[in-house]
Amino acid sequence: MRKSTFALALLFVVVVWIGLQGNQPRAADNVKPPLQKWEYYILESNLNFKDADLNSKGDKGWEIVSIDLNPQTHNTAVFKRPKQ
């Protein structure tokens, strides 16, 4: 009878120990991915933007973020792309 009680107690300890192992953070869980860095380009024009201007920036990896069309002063487009 003592052997079965010891075996049951040992099994209980092992199950609890395995359960606690799952809650501990692993070293890989604490590693943060590197932050993406960006570079920006501002295109200003007194005239309306031409599709060719915008497409040429897109062909070079630039993505338009913002565009401000203000005919009284000048038009502004802001582009970004990942830093290399």
Image: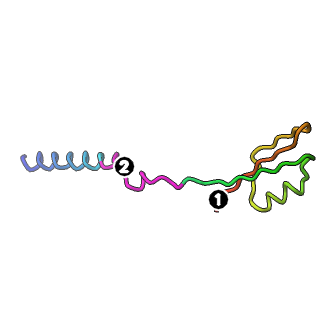
Would you name the residue on which mark 1 appears? 83
Q: Which residue is nearer to you in this view: 61 or 78? A: 78
Q: Which residue is nearer to you in this view: 25 or 81? A: 81
Classify residue 79 as left or right of residue 36.
right
Quadrant of the rendered image containing residue 61: bottom right
Q: Quadrant of the C terminus?
A: bottom right
Q: What element carries label 2?
A: loop
| Residue at horizontal 77 percent and vertical 48 percent from the top | 78
Q: Does the magenta stretch include residue 33?
A: yes
Question: What is the crowding at mark 2: few (fewer than 14 residues within 10 Å), some, or many (at least 20)?
Answer: few
Q: Which mark is residue 9?
A: none
Q: Is residue 74 magenta?
A: no
Query: What percent of the width, then of the height, locates residue 68?
Result: 82, 40
Q: Which region of the structure is painted magenta? A: 21-34
Question: Which residue of the protein is positioned furthest toward the front in this rendering?
Answer: 73
Query: What percent of the width, then of the height, locates residue 52?
Result: 89, 57
Question: Which residue of the protein is positioned furthest toward the left in this rendering?
Answer: 2
